[in-house]
Every structure is written in C-alpha cells, then in structure tokens.
Image (cartoon, rainbow, N blue to C red):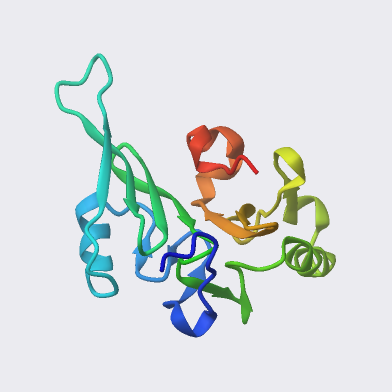
Amino acid sequence: MFEWWHVLADDERQQWTLDPFVSVGPLGFGMRPGEASEALSAVTGEAQRHRLRRRPDEAVAGVEEGEYREFGLKLHYREERLAGIVVDALRGPQVFVEGVALVGRVPSVLEQWMLGRAEAREPNAELSYMDAGVPGSDSLGVVLDVQRAGDHLLTRPVFVPREALDDLSHFLPRDAWSRC
C-alpha cells in the first residue's frame, strides 16, 4: 500500500556528503545533464526526466530541470550546467556536513545548529534568511527549505554553487523553493 507521507529512515537512504560549493554526493556543480545522469546511474536505476526550455534566440531547447522523482532529487540547470540540487525530505538521499544530517529533519533543530555554527564565524557572513524565515548558510551553500510530511514540516535542503549567493532567491526558478 502506498503511503503518501512515508518518510524513509536514514538507513534506507543513500548516504552522501556535502563539499560546500563543489559537490553533493556524486553530483558536482557545473556538470552537464548527461554527466549528472551518469554519476547517478551507480546509485539509482531511475532515469533523469528533463524539462526543456527554449529561448526565442535559441534554435535548440536546453535542459532547465532534471528530476528523479522516486529517488527524491530535483536538479536545476543554468546554461546546461548543474546549478541547484533539491533533496526531497521524504525519500531523498541523506546529506551530511560536519557530521550533521540535513535531510528530513525538524527545521528548528537544524536552525539552532546553524545559529551555533554561526557564532564561531562572522555572523553577518554566515547566516541568511529567505522568504518565510527559511534559513540558509552562506558558508555551506545550503538553504534549509521545508516540505510537508503529514502534519509536520521537515527540512528539504537546496544546495547551490557560490555564485548563487549574489541573488539567491532569484538564482533558481521559483518552483525550486517550497510553497509550504
């Protein structure tokens, strides 16, 4: 029986590590869609589904978004290069940084961890907030967005490269950010 709000336990998920602004698990920022598909072929049999876009001055449509719905990943591309990685809170891989799990967690607990982490750094350069008070770490390149799981909210991290920090809320399309 399908359970709509079923949250996978950590031991049922792929275990990945964040290398800030460089990679999330096997995915490196700047990869082309084919390279991302090849990197993920070792961890999931699911094929990347692409959403294409064509600008008026372009003859060929380019990949704008890739999705692994069952595996729990959404990839955003800019000019055919990986520019954003969104991990589903319910079933996506678990991503660790500094020994801390970032996926499918209670948002307030991770926000407190980020606040504590910021105290050891220059606070103005470490912590930022998006709409609806969603926290992000400027030194890790992650926004701890949220996703509904029944009557609860869990963290649904969005990972970005360094160049995204100049205008984070507009760097990825609006649908990259949750609407909870």
Is 33 rendered above or below residue 118? above
Is 126 rendered above or below residue 55? below
Q: Between residues 19 and 17, which one lies in front from this camera angle?
A: 17
Examine the image and state in which quarter residue 142 appears: bottom right
Quadrant housing the N terminus: bottom left
Examine the image and state in which quarter residue 64 appears: top left
160 relative position to 144: left or right: left
Residue occupying image coordinates x 58% and y 57%: 156
Residue occupying image coordinates x 52% and y 33%: 174
82 relative position to 49: left or right: right
Residue occupying image coordinates x 60% and y 36%: 169
Residue 3 at x, y = what percent? 48, 65
Residue 61 at x, y = what percent? 20, 29
Residue lying furthest left? 59
Residue occupying image coordinates x 48% and y 34%: 173
Number of dots carrying numbers: 0
Residue 42 at x, y = what percent? 24, 75
Is 180 rendered above or below residue 12? above
Residue lying furthest bottom? 11
Quadrant housing the C terminus: top right
Residue 101 at x, y = what percent? 61, 75
Residue lying furthest top? 56
